[in-house]
Amino acid sequence: MSVVLDTPRRVGDVVVAALCRQVLTPMRLGGGAGAGIALAGAKVPVAILLAEGGGVRALGLDGAALADAQVEALCPGALTRMAEAAAAP
């Protein structure tokens, strides 16, 4: 399992992105010479990041604010990537 930052999107003066928990599960199919593999995946949001007015804030899905340290623990570099996306034209 890993947490990834979805592509930041600009909506007016605000840049929005989701932090998502991503799970990939490999599976073996069959046996013998005809064996193969399959990969199943799931992506579930865990937080929303908003960049506006020169700052970045994060909200959990319950609407509660997340501290910067919590965001960085989930997805290192997410705050920097959001700030860069907000600064881009």
Image (cartoon, rainbow, N blue to C red):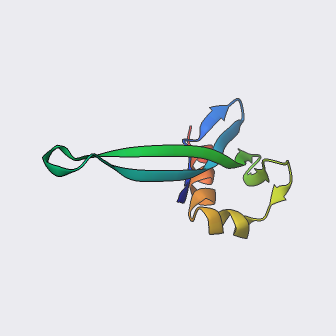
Q: How many marks?
A: 0
* Percent x, y of residue 77: 56, 62
Q: Is residue 49 left or right of residue 22?
A: right
For the point 72% across and 35% down, the residue is 13
The quarter of the picture where the C terminus appears is top right
For this view, does 72 lie left or right of residue 88?
right
- Residue furthest top as drawn: 12
Q: Position of residue 67 (x, y in %)?
A: 78, 65
Residue at the image position 61 percent from the left and 49 percent from the top: 20
Q: Position of residue 46 (x, y in %)?
A: 69, 51
Q: Is residue 67 above or below residue 12?
A: below
In the image, residue 71 lies at what x, y percent? 68, 62
Closer-to-camera residue (82/62): 62
Camera-nearest residue between 60 and 13: 60
* Quadrant of residue 74 within the rendered picture: bottom right
Outermost residue to the left = 33
Q: Residue at x 77, y 46 (%)?
A: 53
Residue at 57 percent of width and 65 percent of height: 76
The quadrant where residue 75 appears: bottom right
Residue 44, picture quadrant: top right
